[in-house]
Amino acid sequence: MILIFYFSILIIIISNIMMFISIILSKKSFIDREKSSPFECGFDPKSSARIPFSLHFFLITMIFLIFDVEIALIFPMIISFKLTNFFIWSMTTIFFIIILLIGLYHEWNQNMLNWTN
């Protein structure tokens, strides 16, 4: 039991020494803080977070996410083709694709796919 206590103390001492050495040897300066700051779509991270955001950019992002999830849902359909009845599989796939096409048609009618806004 005492051996475990000594090893835990030794581990704590070694880890503190390694952290202290890394702080001493690091070459960070004030100029490097700008490089380490997050870069988010060209926004200045030091300014206010409540600046106006392009709604059109947000809608295009949502469309991309919807169709990205759609691809993730189509892959299991391809794998399940061998396991199920062809008629049930084809009806499910056609129904799924029709729902996606209706959504795409609605987005097209709302001019969400135009970049000229």
Image (cartoon, rainbow, N blue to C red):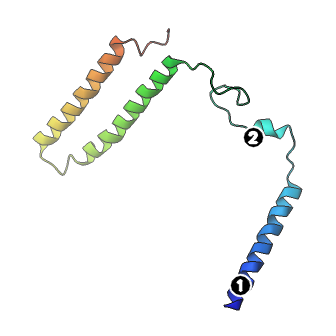
Residue type, label 1 = Phe
Crowding near the residue tagged with mark 2, few <14, some 14–19, many ≥20 C-alpha atoms within 10 Å: few
Crowding near the residue tagged with mark 1, few <14, some 14–19, many ≥20 C-alpha atoms within 10 Å: few
Which label number is shown at residue 92?
none
Q: Position of residue 47 (x, y in %)?
A: 72, 26
Residue placed at 49% from the left, 13% from the top? 115
Q: Position of residue 11 (x, y in %)?
A: 74, 76
Q: Quadrant of residue 63?
A: top left
Residue placed at 44% from the left, 12% from the top? 114
Find numbered disc 2 in the image and state the secondary structure of the residue it sits on.
helix
- Outermost top residue: 116
Residue type, label 2 = Ser
Which label number is shown at residue 36?
2
Question: Label 1 to label 2, Cα distance in Å?
Answer: 39 Å
Q: Is residue 94 above or below residue 84?
A: above
Residue placed at 31% from the left, 17% from the top? 106
Find numbered disc 1 in the image and state the secondary structure of the residue it sits on.
helix
Tell me which numbered mark, 1 or 2, is placed earlier along the sequence. Answer: 1
Dividing the image into 4 quarters, which one contains the N terminus?
A: bottom right
Q: Position of residue 69 (x, y in %)?
A: 37, 37
For label 1, the residue is: 5
Tell me: 22 left or right of 82: right
Q: Nearer the viewer, residue 101 or 20?
A: 20
Tell me: 68 left or right of 41: left
Q: Quadrant of residue 44?
A: top right
Q: Position of residue 87 (x, y in %)?
A: 10, 40
Q: Nearer the viewer, residue 89 or 12?
A: 12
Q: Nearer the viewer, residue 57 or 53?
A: 53
Q: Is residue 56 above or below residue 27?
A: above
Mark whose residue sits in front, 1 or 2: 1
Residue placed at 23% from the left, 33% from the top? 96
